[in-house]
Image (cartoon, rainbow, N blue to C red):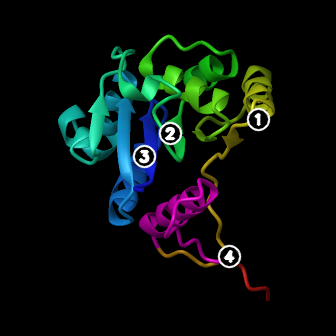
Amino acid sequence: MTQRLVVGITGATGAIYGVEILRRARALGVETHLVVSPAGVLNAHHELGLDRNALETLADHAYAPGEVGACIASGSFESAAMVVAPCSMKTLAAIAHGLGDNLLTRAADVTLKERRRLLLMVRETPFNLAHLRNMTAATEMGAIVFPPLPAFYHRPSSIAEIVAESVERVLALLQLDGAAPRSWNGL
């Protein structure tokens, strides 16, 4: 059976993470289901020059945030996992408090209730107390909070290498077949 991954892209900086997850998932043969918030589209356009159509062509299936009747809004739709990359603090707060007011947050809620993996690439710095409490709440419900903090021990020489390594770590945490993060082998 083909693995399925739900991908959310929100308005936080770091749209490249969502885009690269979609590209890498396609290369691994993972079926992707994408929801991009309006702010996510704005940010992807600003950071990468991509519009909604360009983002949606990177996925096997794409839905508008208002399509709350889409298949990914139901627990009967089987998926391996969901990732929100990047995850804004607004989206984090909605997920942490069970506010499924759009398809992206409803899909996250379904992922949690079905005890599937939900990974949130939260983007904000510094964190305020509300951010920290929301991350704690999401973690207590089973989500994995994964700020895309780069590792430098492999001596990356470009932003693309930093992004690629984070994406591989995300895909491995989501338990997708073929993910290949580089291991630390000691000094």
Neighbours of disc 3 within 10 Å: few (<14), some (14-19), many (20+): many
Residue to which mark 3 is pinned: 18
Q: Position of residue 55 (x, y in %)?
A: 26, 41
Task: State the extent of the magenta-drawn residues as a range.
Answer: 158-183
Verify whether residue 127 appears in magenta: no
Q: Which residue is more in the foreground, 120 or 113? A: 113
Q: Tell me if 4 is positioned left or right of 172 in this view.
A: left
Contact between labelled residues 2 and 4, with CB atoms less than 8 Å apart: no
Badge 2 local density, few (<14 within 10 Å), some, or many (20+)? Answer: many
| Residue that lies at the very extreme toward the bottom in this rendered image | 187
Q: Residue at x 65, y 27 (%)?
A: 113
The residue closer to the viewer here, 58 or 52, is 58
Front of the two marks 4 and 2: 2
Question: Which label's residue is closer to the chain start, 4 or 2?
Answer: 2
Q: Contact (CB < 8 A) between labels 3 and 2? A: yes
Dot label at residue 171: none
Q: Position of residue 2 (x, y in %)?
A: 40, 56
Q: Secondary structure at mark 3?
A: helix
Q: Which mark is residue 86?
A: 2
Q: Indicate the quadrant where residue 169 lies.
A: bottom right
Q: Are marks 1 and 4 in contact (CB under 8 Å)?
A: no
Q: Which residue is mark 1?
A: 139
Judge left or right: residue 69 versus residue 50.
Answer: right
Callout 1 secondary element: helix
Distance in Å between CA atoms under marks 4 and 2:
23 Å
Identity, as a three-letter code, of the amino acid under mark 4: Tyr
